[in-house]
Image (spheres, coloured by chain):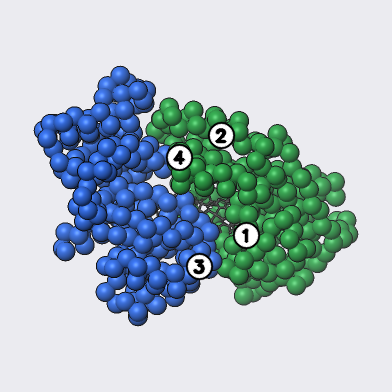
Amino acid sequence: MDQVLGQIAVCVERGKINMASPFPPDLAGQNGAEELTQSALDAGLSAEEILNQGLIVGMQKIGEKFRNNEAFVPDVLLAAKAMNAAMKLLEPLFKADANRFKGTLVMGTVAGDLHDIGKNLASMIIQGAGWKVVDMGVDVSTEKFLDAIKANEGCVVGMSALLTTTMANMEQTVRAIKEASPATKVIVGGAPLSQEFADKVGADCYCPDPQRGAEFLESLSAGA
Amino acid sequence: MNDPGISDQTIETVIAFDEIAVDAASLIQSMGYIDSACPEPVRLTVEEALLEAAPHVDIRGGYRILPDDVRLENSGEIECGACRFKVGKVIKGQLRRARRLALFAITIGDALETQARDLLRGDDPVKGYVLDATASLIVESAADRLHEQLRNAAAEWGWKTTNRFSPGYCGWPVEQQHILFAQLPAKFCGITLSETALMHPIKSVSGVIGLGDGVAYHPYPCDFCNRQDCYKRKR
Ligand code: B1M
């Protein structure tokens, strides 16, 4: 049993979607994430077990490699593709969001900023860690974040900013969220940010990379 | 020092895709693959992206050479006509001997980026990301081409050019984009600047280049800038 979960994790980490996919070359002709997920289901493993002990483990590994500069953005995207292919088989089996997701992250690029590559990548990795991500897009005003908090009770908020000018807007939004909803956790990321900035504005976690966000969220769900 | 009496001049130009140098190797490198092998699907996507990009780019760039002398202020600022740029020590050092400043901006339009965004959020994230990286590389390379055009023009007056420097780099606050754009015609090359100093289209680059008979172009800019957290340094 453990073996198939381990194989699923490897397929996700290495972006091996199914048997037909020729990549990576050393796994050509072998089962991929799709077939292995099907065999795990056939062997009686639950969707939750496959998700948590197979798919998520694979995404976590690639996330760690990315953080250590041993893997790059396309490698993470290939892994996400393999995970998504397997998820198509699992999705119908989850009876409720509560079984499927560890929690909800409302994610957006702050007002005045249109950069979204980093935000999208962080969303994929956090989704791959078992969280539901509500993507608010780019140029998201404080009001929109506050509305989304109301609409997604108990959510965590994630924000991205790529310019020092829009970091100022991030500061305003974090402060407004903390005032209106002090219990809401806020995580922030983006190239010009720093731990110091995150502390100053009152964010709960600074994410130099998406994996840090996933780890912080994991600590929340573990403590819940 | 000769002064060819360069007057205020603004040039807007269209650069053809085949005038710029983007190849698979530099694109792969720009995505981080330096020592490690690039996965085959990514390599194939890179080749596809380079073939498909051309019809989606509309490169428009230009510069204005300000007619005024460049003055270095003790405060660490650089003054040229109505511009007072807080460029910081690194850039100031490089512009030290400049007689004139050229302000430039260049864009590749938003078609490629829009396509990249749709793919990234939809069916093919890998291709979306590769196209986005392609677009970034194209605009950087187009800026190099524009720089070369200015260098050729300067050579005719017996002058040389410095490296190009952009607000937001080497300690120059990105907010100062507003000062730069105030000196360029409205919607210069189709670029607009938001309140937060963001250019639209996103795949745009702006900056200054120093001109003069005593300036130099530095092929290894990391030697004069010691910012350890700069992403270009990692490359
Ligand atoms: C909530 O949870 C989370 C968790 C993690 C999160 C998160 C949220 N959000 C992000 N993360 C984190 O996870 C992601 C994966 O690790 C990361 O997300 P990123 O978005 O950082 O990373 C992406 C996956 C890939 N990264 C990127 O796509 C951006 C890369 C860098 C090199 C970059 C690029 C490529 C470009 N640029 Co420009 N650019 C830079 C960038 C420097 C850098 N080191 O990042 C940055 C952002 N740019 C900068 C600047 C100044 C500019 N750029 C400009 C132009 C460009 C290009 C067009 C050439 C190109 C494309 C930009 C684009 N996004 O389309 C100009 C502005 C463009 C505009 N439209 O206004 C211009 C203003 C320069 C100029 N004057 O022309 C700098 C901003 C500095 C500042 N002070 O604000 C900059 C940090 C470079 C630098 N100086 O080091 C993490 O930050």
In the picture, one chain is blue; tell me its letter.
A
Cα–Cα gap, marks 2 and 1: 24 Å
SS at circle 2: helix
Horizontal side of B2 relative to B195 (left or right) equals right
**Is disc 2's CB within 8 Å of ligand 1?**
no
Q: Are marks 2 and 1 on the same chain?
A: yes
Q: Position of residue B179 (x, y in %)?
A: 68, 69
Q: What separation in Å lies between label 3 and label 1 (alpha carbons)?
A: 14 Å
Mark 4 C-beta closer than 8 Å to ligand 1: no
Q: Is residue B34 left or right of residue A151?
A: right
Q: Secondary structure at mark 4?
A: loop
Q: Quadrant of residue A66?
A: top left
Task: Look at mark 3 in the image and give the residue it sits on.
Answer: A111
The disc label shown at residue B199, or none: 1
The quarter of the rendered structure image containing the N terminus of chain A is top left
Residue type (three-letter) at the residue carrying disc 3:
Ala
- The residue marked by circle 3 belongs to what chain? A
Give the labeled residue for mark 2: B49
Classify residue B131 as left or right of residue A20. Answer: right
> B112 above or below B1?
above
Residue depicted at 29% across the width and 71% down the height: A184
**Disc 1 or 4, which lies upstream in sequence?**
4
Q: Quadrant of the C terminus of chain A?
A: bottom left
Give the label, 3 or 4, closer to the camera: 4
Task: Give the letter of the chain under mark 1.
Answer: B
Residue position marked by numbered label 4 in the rendering = B123
Q: Disc 3 versus disc 2: distance between alpha carbons?
A: 31 Å
